[in-house]
């Protein structure tokens, strides 16, 4: 008996990975499967290409990266359509994703020289006879492993910054979105035809594992926390440094002086854009008692208006068929433990779609509150005050982003969230702010993409001291005399002994 193919599940056929639409099952792309030897070869070729790329200098790379972002802008509708077909994401969401990616390429290209280029650093009195020089040199080849939920934004968040820093990049896209990954590297090759500076290898998890072991200078991983552990273990074998952008269970806090309409709007969008399949998506909400009922009403009204289906809707299909079981389990468990669905509920799961679901009175130990659901679902919990909201928001091992709605205390609350990022009176907006670093704490990972930190992530600090005068206080030499050492003691006591 032949197994029935579930739309959206990748197929392996005659040495190729076949990517299919989760909505219709239509073929979205067919990419050659890489073997371990292919991965090594791709990395070796990239290493040679990287040397050429470094030779272009910051200005040469900047010019090419800006040409690439112009090409993406020119073809934004084409790429959005591919992302829509391959992953099921509504076209408008795909456009927003690509706009954000273009913004990151532009910023990384324009700022890499300033942030990473050689510069003098100030000397101190001790060793004042030496000048200090700092620069960030590329790793050579950076391996980028990406997820399927943002197949343009997440790989570019690493790749554009790594490229701007002078690295070559080998991308392993998710098996669910290989065509989008290939589109990115093909478009890059159009503006940089000379050398394979940015290439892709395709396959399942084993190809990602091979990339970890392929001799790359650094590995940038975006995906689930469970896979992140495997990636770190593989990279540990060769002490290959890693950047981990893991999963999340981001919370929104609604304080008593919040604009409830704005909070409900941001909550529904933050929780349900891309059918809730967003690492920094709002999954849990803590609203303080005086505004809880009014806020829940507003969220239910807005979420209830969202349309669900394959074309021209607000919410598309769930990309990974297997995720439907997770979403169903979370909703069922929430209700079994005393929660109530004030919108949607168990019947909301209608494969490949999930209709908006809002759950209240869900115990904090329920999977719907503790685990990544990755569906258009929200739990909203009543809390006494903002302090209790912060305590509950911070109670999970994850710590990616978060959102706070309020006036007087909102920024102070945002600072207390145990997360790498937070938006005040909006949701997810830090992701599109290319000047700000992006990344998490705890199970959400470490290291940063985007912004100055994101550029530095892809360069090794190289420190150089250069003698500029004779040493008046020689210490780092066997030629020093007891008098020199005595003077050294005197100087250090004068400076610091108080
Ligand atoms: P996975 O962890 O399943 O996969 C991520 C990538 O790792 C895929 O390309 C996957 O390949 C690859 N992979 C799988 N096994 C291995 C292995 N043993 N060694 C190396 N690579 C491997 O995540 P998803 O694709 O399901 O993405 C969703 C997750 O990503 C969510 O948890 C989400 O929160 C997180 N995410 C985090 C973001 C952040 O910036 N912090 C941003 C976006 C998503 P294959 O697909 O072929 O299995």
Image (spheres, rainbow, N blue to C red):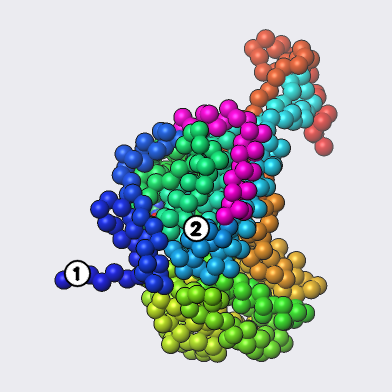
Left or right: 356 as drawn, with respect to 265: left
Residue appearing at x 50%, y 58% in the figure: 151
Write down which quadrant ligand 1 falls in. bottom left
Disc 1 on helix, strand or loop? loop
Depth check: 145 or 202 in front?
Answer: 202
Q: Nearer the viewer, residue 456 or 33?
A: 33
Please give the name of the residue rendered at 32% of the width and 42% of the height, measured from the top-left corner. 36
User: Does the Cβ of the disc 2 residue fall within 8 Å of ligand 1?
Assistant: no
Say if residue 443 shows up in the picture. no
**Residue denoted by label 1:** 2
Instruction: Work out whether residue 6 can be spotted.
Output: yes
Q: Nearer the viewer, residue 339 or 307?
A: 307
Q: Quadrant of residue 224?
A: bottom left
Residues drawn in magenta:
47-75
The crowd level at tag 2 (other Cα within 10 Å; few <14, some 14-19, many 20+) is many
Residue wearing tag 2? 151
């Amino acid at each position: 008996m032949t197994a029935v193919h579930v739309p959206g599940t990748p197929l392996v056929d005659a040495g190729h990975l076949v990517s299919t639409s989760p909505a219709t099952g239509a073929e979205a792309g067919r990419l050659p499967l890489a073997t371990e030897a292919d991965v090594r070869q791709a990395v070796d070729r990239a290493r040679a290409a990287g040397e050429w790329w470094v030779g272009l200098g910051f200005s040469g790379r900047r010019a090419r990266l800006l040409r690439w972002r112009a090409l993406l802008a020119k073809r934004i509708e084409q790429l959005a359509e591919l992302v829509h077909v391959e992953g099921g994401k509504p076209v408008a969401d795909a456009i927003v994703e690509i706009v954000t990616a273009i913004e990151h390429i532009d910023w990384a290209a324009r700022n890499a020289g300033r942030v990473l280029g050689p510069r003098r650093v100030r000397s101190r009195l001790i060793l004042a006879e030496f000048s200090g020089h700092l620069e960030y040199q590329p790793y050579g080849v950076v391996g980028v492993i990406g997820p399927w939920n943002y197949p343009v934004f997440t790989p570019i968040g690493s790749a554009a910054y790594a490229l701007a820093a002078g690295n070559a990049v080998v991308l392993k896209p998710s098996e669910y979105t290989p065509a989008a990954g290939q589109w990115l590297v093909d478009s890059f090759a159009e503006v940089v035809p000379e050398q394979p500076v940015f290439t892709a290898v395709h396959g399942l998890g084993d190809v990602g594992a091979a990339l970890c072991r392929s001799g790359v200078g650094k590995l940038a991983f975006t995906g689930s926390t469970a896979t992140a552990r495997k990636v770190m273990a593989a990279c540990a074998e060769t002490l290959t440094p890693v950047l981990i952008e893991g999963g999340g269970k981001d919370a929104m806090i609604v304080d008593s002086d919040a604009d409830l309409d704005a909070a409900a709007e941001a909550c529904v969008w933050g929780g349900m854009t891309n059918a809730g399949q967003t690492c920094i998506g709002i999954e849990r909400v803590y609203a303080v008692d005086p505004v809880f009922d009014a806020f829940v009403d507003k969220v239910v009204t807005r979420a209830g208006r969202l349309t669900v289906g394959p074309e021209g809707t607000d919410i598309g299909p769930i990309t990974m068929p297997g995720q439907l079981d997770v979403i169903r389990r979370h909703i069922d468990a929430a209700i079994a433990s005393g929660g109530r669905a004030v919108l949607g509920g168990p019947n909301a799961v209608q494969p490949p779609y999930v209709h908006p679901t809002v759950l209240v009175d869900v115990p904090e130990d329920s999977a719907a509150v503790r685990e990544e659901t990755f569906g258009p679902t929200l739990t909203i919990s009543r809390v006494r005050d903002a302090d209790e909201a912060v305590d509950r928001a911070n109670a999970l091992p994850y710590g990616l982003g978060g959102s706070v709605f309020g006036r007087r205390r909102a920024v102070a609350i945002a600072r207390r969230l145990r997360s790498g990022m937070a938006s005040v009176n909006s949701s997810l907006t830090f992701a599109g702010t290319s000047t700000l670093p992006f990344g998490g704490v705890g199970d959400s990972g470490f290291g940063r993409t985007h912004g100055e930190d994101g550029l530095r992530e892809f360069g090794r600090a190289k420190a150089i001291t250069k003698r500029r005068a004779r040493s008046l206080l020689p210490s780092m030499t066997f030629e020093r005399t007891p008098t020199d050492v005595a003077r050294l003691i005197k100087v250090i006591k004068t400076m610091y002994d108080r």
